[in-house]
Image: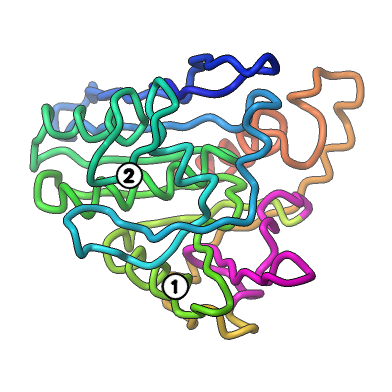
Amino acid sequence: MSVCEIDINGNPVEIPAGFIVRLEPTDTKKSSIIVVAFHGTQNSYEVNKVDNYIVPATFGGLVATLGSVHGGFYAQYTTGSNLQPGNLIARADGSLAQQIYQYFKENEDPTISVKVTGHSLGGALATLCALDIAFNFEFKYDAISLYSLASPRVADTLVSDPSGAGTFVSNYQKYVPDSYRIVNDLDSIPQLPYPVTPPIPPLNYCAHVLGDLGAILLGIVQPSLLDQNLISFSDKNDQNKDASMACQGTHSCPAVYVPFLKRLAAKFA
């Protein structure tokens, strides 16, 4: 998968955004799975995706507005290859939304489960993608699951319309109940945007799709049984000071999140 960005000279550039792969098991008793994976922020073009404007979360049909979401993440998912704006009804050519829709339309198989994952910005895109697939292909696949790593908050609404974020979260949980949010407690990125942001008007209410204690305490979202699907750990990652920048800090995917997943997987081996 690829996404179009603007470089420092104002020119459109196409960069990798992740991949879709079908995995065939060696054990004949197990079925195939499709994995959709989005990577995190790769360059300065993508940093501005953490912004403060919102859009209705329209995931199909003229009246299927499922709440409201963070405008930057939604734009990253729906903008076309020539930077033409799009949405999840009129999917712009070359957009992630169009690439996802085309793949799953051409590969419908009710015996296959779908696993969607992503780190950081990729976690936010994975959240939108999982709901996109679940809403538009609900009966075309055996199951759809999300595993987000270090994702920022995706639900986003103006204080003047306080129901928007909560509506998105409740709809998300309805369509993608098999979701897990994996977070290093020492990582600052999953704390953004703050539940109430910015500190001066206009104010936004923001929330994670599950396990967001801050948003729950502020009444932005209601407690849910899915909140127990928040998987948290603590890793200072203070041993990699001489490593590459990608392996430094508490937000690092290869140095923090991947090792945690390996430790977690080993418990079930």
Question: In the drawing, what numbered circle is on residue 15?
Answer: none
Horizontal and vertical percent for residue 247?
76, 26
Say whether residue 213 is magenta.
yes
Q: Dot 2: few (<14), some (14–19), or many (≥20) neighbours within 10 Å?
A: many
* Residue shown at 58% from the left, 80% from the top: 216
Residue 164 tag number: 1
Amino acid type at mark 2? Asn
Q: Position of residue 217 (x, y in %)?
A: 64, 84
Up-down: is 65 above or below 13? Answer: below
Which span of residues is magenta-colored?
Answer: 186-215
Who comes first in sequence, dot 2 or dot 1? 2
Q: Name the residue at 43% across, 43% down.
A: 126
Number of callouts: 2
Query: Which residue is under mark 2?
Result: 87
Which one is nearer the viewer's eye here, 111 or 162?
Answer: 162
- On screen, residue 251 versus residue 208, left or right, reads right
The residue shown at (79%, 69%) is 199
